[in-house]
Amino acid sequence: MKIVVARDGPYRVSGRVPLVVQVIRPNADGLSWNWEEGRTFETPAEYALCRCGHSKNKPFCDESHVGVQFDGKETATRQPFARQAETFDGPSLELSDAEELCAFARFCDPGGKIWGLLGRTDDPNVRRLVLREGMSCPSGRLVLHDKKSGEPIEPELPPSIGVVEDPALGCSGPLWIRGGIRVESEEGRPYEVRNRVTLCRCGASVNKPFCNGSHASIRFQDGLV
């Protein structure tokens, strides 16, 4: 399975990667709480996903990037996550946070922001909440490590692409790349393979190909939900 970022064009997906809508559902307080799986798209072994935000056949590419003269220049760093991230320490968990990768899904907020809760993770209930918040982050901006083992604590995600929808915020979100699918530039240069990353599909990110939350500020809509 592989995703190639075409120069000023779409994401070219190969290897029979499943494609499914993933909806952010809030709790009673209106804060992001659950992922709800929506429709599954029928896809061939290879397909192209819109990156410019202008396709009339979202999430698939319809060559609109040509007409709008889309500038899809890749600007993201090639540094591994560990070198990008700031580390926050708690009694039982350590949090790595690479803020530039934030996709504005807001799972880090319910019950108190994860950074404030981290210092209370010797309480089992708080620890469970922190784990929930950290592992629900689609972009992998937030990664928790168990302090006893030193190992990262990651959700088990099937290799697939989630088309993120955020009805509570009134917009459509990024492509959620799950389960360690390789992402590479047109010339074959790979980015770090990770369990969770989010790719921009509104065309407005300044951290291409990754999402930086710009879909929220421009109220990107794909018409799927």
Image (cartoon, grey):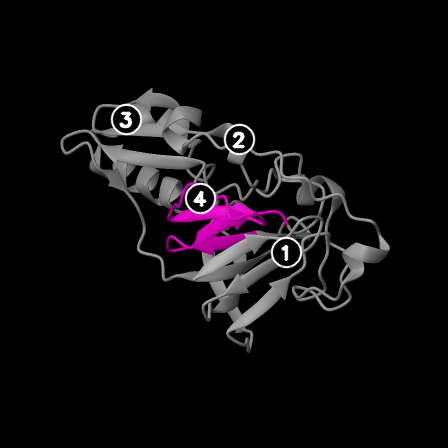
Which label's residue is closer to the chain start, 4 or 2?
Answer: 2
Q: Quadrant of residue 126?
A: top left
User: How dense is the environment of label 3, judged by Cα within 10 Å: few (below 14), some, or many (20 and up)?
Assistant: some
Q: Secondary structure at mark 2?
A: loop
Which residue is disc 4 drawn over?
Answer: 137
Q: Which residue is mark 1?
A: 167
Mark 2 vs mark 1, CA separation in Å: 30 Å
Residue 188 shown in magenta: yes
Task: Please provide the residue range marked out in magenta.
Answer: 175-200
Residue pictured at 78% horizontal, 48% vertical: 70
Q: Circles 4 and 1: CB distance less than 8 Å?
A: no
Q: Nearer the viewer, mark 4 or mark 1?
A: 4
The numbered dot on residue 120 is 3
* Quarter of the image with the C terminus in it: bottom right
Q: Amino acid at mark 3?
A: Arg
Q: Residue 30 vs residue 9: left or right?
A: left
